[in-house]
Amino acid sequence: MDVLHSMFIMVAYVLVSSVKASMAVNDSIGVSQFMSDGMTLVSQDGMFELGFFSPGNSTKRYLGIWYKKVAMHAVVWVANRVNPINGNSGKLTLDNTGNIILISNNGSVVWSTTSQREPLNPVAHLMDSGNLVVWNDGGSDSNDILWQSFDYPTDTYLLGMKLGRDLQNGFEWRITSWKSVDDPSPGNFSLGLALSDYPEFAIMNGTKKFSQIGPWNGLYYSGLPSLNAYSDIEISYVSNQKEIYYTFSSKNGSVISRTVINQTSKVLSRYVWVEKAQTWRIYESLPGDVCDNFGLCGAYGSCITTSAPICQCLKGFRPKSAEAWNSSNWAQGCVRDESLSCTDIGEGIGIANTTDGFFKFEGLKLPDTQHTRLLQNLDIHGCSALCLNNCSCMAYTNSDISGGGHGCVMWFGDLIDIKLFQSGGQDLYIRMPASESEKSKMQEYMEGYVDDTDLPLFDLLTINIATDKFSLNNKIGQGGFGPVYKGKLAHGPEIAVKRLSRSSGQGMAEFITEVKLIAKLQHRNLVKLLGCCIQGEEKLLVYEYVVNGSLDTFIFDQTKSKLLDWPRRFHIIFGVARGLLYLHQDSRLRIIHRDLKASNILLDDKLNPKISDFGMAKTFGGDQTEGNTNRVVGT
Ligand SMILES: *[C@@H]1O[C@H](CO)[C@@H](O)[C@H](O)[C@H]1NC(C)=O
Ligand SMILES: *[C@@H]1O[C@H](CO)[C@@H](O)[C@H](O)[C@H]1NC(C)=O
Ligand SMILES: *[C@@H]1O[C@H](CO)[C@@H](O)[C@H](O)[C@H]1NC(C)=O
Ligand SMILES: *[C@@H]1O[C@H](CO)[C@@H](O)[C@H](O)[C@H]1NC(C)=O
Ligand SMILES: *[C@@H]1O[C@H](CO)[C@@H](O)[C@H](O)[C@H]1NC(C)=O
Ligand SMILES: *[C@@H]1O[C@H](CO)[C@@H](O)[C@H](O)[C@H]1NC(C)=O
Ligand SMILES: *[C@@H]1O[C@H](CO)[C@@H](O)[C@H](O)[C@H]1NC(C)=O
Ligand SMILES: *[C@@H]1O[C@H](CO)[C@@H](O)[C@H](O)[C@H]1NC(C)=O
Ligand SMILES: *[C@@H]1O[C@H](CO)[C@@H](O)[C@H](O)[C@H]1NC(C)=O
Ligand SMILES: *[C@@H]1O[C@H](CO)[C@@H](O)[C@H](O)[C@H]1NC(C)=O
Ligand SMILES: CC(=O)N[C@H]1CO[C@H](CO)[C@@H](O)[C@@H]1O
């Protein structure tokens, strides 16, 4: 008999019996009362129903709870998962020890609860939440629970349930898949809490991690930044000496939501009932993309859904086996370009060589937390110092990112299962040898973490917005070192952005030093460098925008050249000379332009000349100048 068929009989029963008893629903069962196959209990609000059913094509009978009110009934809980009843002989009762007992025709106990307490007037009640609760004392105290089905979930998580661990009793709240649609006995897939200092929720395939949702970071699960964006549910995470769990609740009270782990599809999905469409709609799933497959990119590999290949070694690392990596076999992961200098001196004596440093990585799903240490009262600086002084500490970050971040979590051993998000994600500081971490300090510097008033820094987003993502419409020239774009800062002046070609081959440190020097050169006949921007591969110089363009557009244009009368031309020549004099003699740097030409002289609104591209040849190498300007250096 299929579910719908049995449902029909049950509905008929409820209708008939409710007429007889002249009450709408029967939601509870008392001591020595029986409920046989064909009869059901229905929660007060009519949402859930408890009764016997046969799943899929099976003819076996199971006691379960399912949604009654919505058109597509979904089973949310099964009592006798591994011990079905043959035929319609099953009977449910509550005995005087307060335990629910399921018996088959021949009198054998198929399934029962195991409350050890001495009860007083127990009663089993199907709640509006879908929870089957055995109350003590007729339910007079709502906290006096002898047993509840929410403590023994099957494959479905309902709002209000706990998922995690009861540390005092070693008890676990975990959902486990059915073996198949016909067989509700426990399958190999489950969702639960993987205990560690910084525990994380993970989907398991047997005893192996299949996909991790990540640890709770105070705002969301590290691997599911989108989850807290859903306005219909509220997530609470509780972690103390007694228990660690999370629970979802409906903010609005009217949301019908269930989360199911499914062995056939190998996916954990959260469904929400959509009344208008009369269907269950999937809100989120895990694995949500290929990068959610646990450890896909191996140690120190980072998974990026939009890159090809999807696995990339973190900066400062290279594939352990280039061949395996090439053939999309990433499991071996990555190794350091340069080894760490940190070495423990003697056994257990923690005097470490502290010439290592940390590189900040952004936008990540945190790596697997199995080998972590949590220090909730330590701030990020203390965390950094502690990690630096223990050679096996490979990374650290704030354990809680809410309110600007606090707490400390440190990783020991290789870092695996890192994912890079398109947006959102967390920061992680990974141990690097001194040479790499020098660069990282520069990186931090460029990102504005170190304050330096010498050189204003712009972030890439600002420049992107200002130049309309470097649109072709905004391109105003192609200089010797890369294209130039016009831009407009929000509430600010117009700017010209020079996007340096990527092959400049220059280190971050040298670049910044040079740019700072150039920025110090200020003269009214020089184009003013306002700042720069470095992010990843991008190196950008931000200049003041000079409105009338370059001199060559005037002198080599039939009509425009007439605008330049002799007094104006003299004024321009004089200005260029003054600018050069400053560069050659009066500035601290003494710069030779090496590429002075009409296209490098810009004119402002009053046709005053301003020299551009000065300092570039020195800074960015003679080769480029020659290559792109077809000029002999030194003329
Ligand atoms: C409620 O259902 C149980 C089990 O079917 C039955 O024993 C009991 O008599 C019913 N109570 C009422 C008030 O109908
Ligand atoms: C039940 O059996 C029928 C016929 O064998 C098959 O077409 C159908 O897919 C089966 N349904 C399930 C849920 O297994
Ligand atoms: C009683 O029924 C159960 C399941 O329906 C079966 O496993 C058990 O062997 C039966 N016991 C006897 C004594 O027939
Ligand atoms: C579950 O795991 C066991 C042992 O690991 C294996 O024999 C079985 O085939 C697995 N079942 C499924 C459906 O994957
Ligand atoms: C689950 O684990 C079993 C062995 O433990 C393996 O054979 C199977 O491929 C795994 N399933 C998935 C989907 O990874
Ligand atoms: C809850 O949300 C639904 C749909 O979004 C809306 O129709 C209903 O009015 C809301 N109820 C409350 C109490 O806010
Ligand atoms: C599990 O997934 C399979 C295949 O996608 C589907 O047929 C089945 O209905 C799902 N089971 C549940 C309980 O959603
Ligand atoms: C990896 O593949 C690229 C092109 O697909 C090839 O140029 C390179 O030599 C390969 N490297 C190794 C180590 O196989
Ligand atoms: C610390 O590292 C530096 C640089 O790698 C090395 O020269 C020095 O010998 C190391 N000191 C100790 C005590 O390991
Ligand atoms: C480094 O940290 C690990 C993990 O907390 C600890 O077992 C080890 O003793 C520490 N080593 C030193 C030298 O402090
Ligand atoms: C010749 C020329 O284009 N002159 C312009 C220089 O810029 C000022 C201010 O934008 C304009 O008013 C001039 O027409």
Image (cartoon, rainbow, N blue to C red):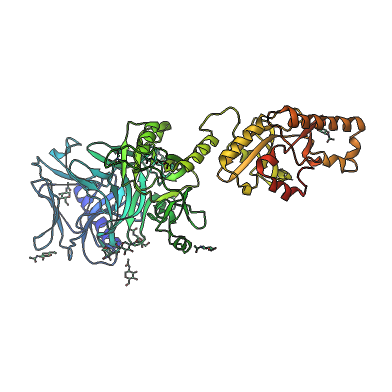
Q: Nearer the viewer, residue 276 or 112?
A: 112
- The answer to whether 97 is drawn above or below residue 399 in the figure is below
Tell me which image quadrant ligand 6 sits in.
top left
Residue 610 to residue 184: above or below: above
- The picture quadrant where one finds residue 373 is top left
Q: Is residue 168 left or right of residue 192?
A: left
How far across and how far down the image is residue 397, in percent? 39, 38
Q: Could one spot residue 9 in this view of the protein?
A: yes
* Residue 475 placement, left or right of 207: right
> Taking 58 as reference, is 283 above or below it?
above
Return the residue nearer the eye: 617 or 6: 617
Q: Quadrant of the N terminus?
A: bottom left
Q: How many marks?
A: 0
Residue 200 location, quadrant: top left
Can the viewer see residue 69 in this picture?
A: no
Q: The C terminus lies in which quarter of the figure?
A: top right
* Observer-nearest of 358 and 492: 358
Residue shown at the point (39%, 51%) measured from the top left: 417
Residue 345 image offset from top left, x and y in percent:
31, 41
Identity of the residue drawn at 69% across and 48% down: 623
Image x and y of residue 441, in percent: 50, 37
Report x, y in % for residue 286: 39, 53
Q: Nearer the viewer, residue 138 or 563?
A: 563
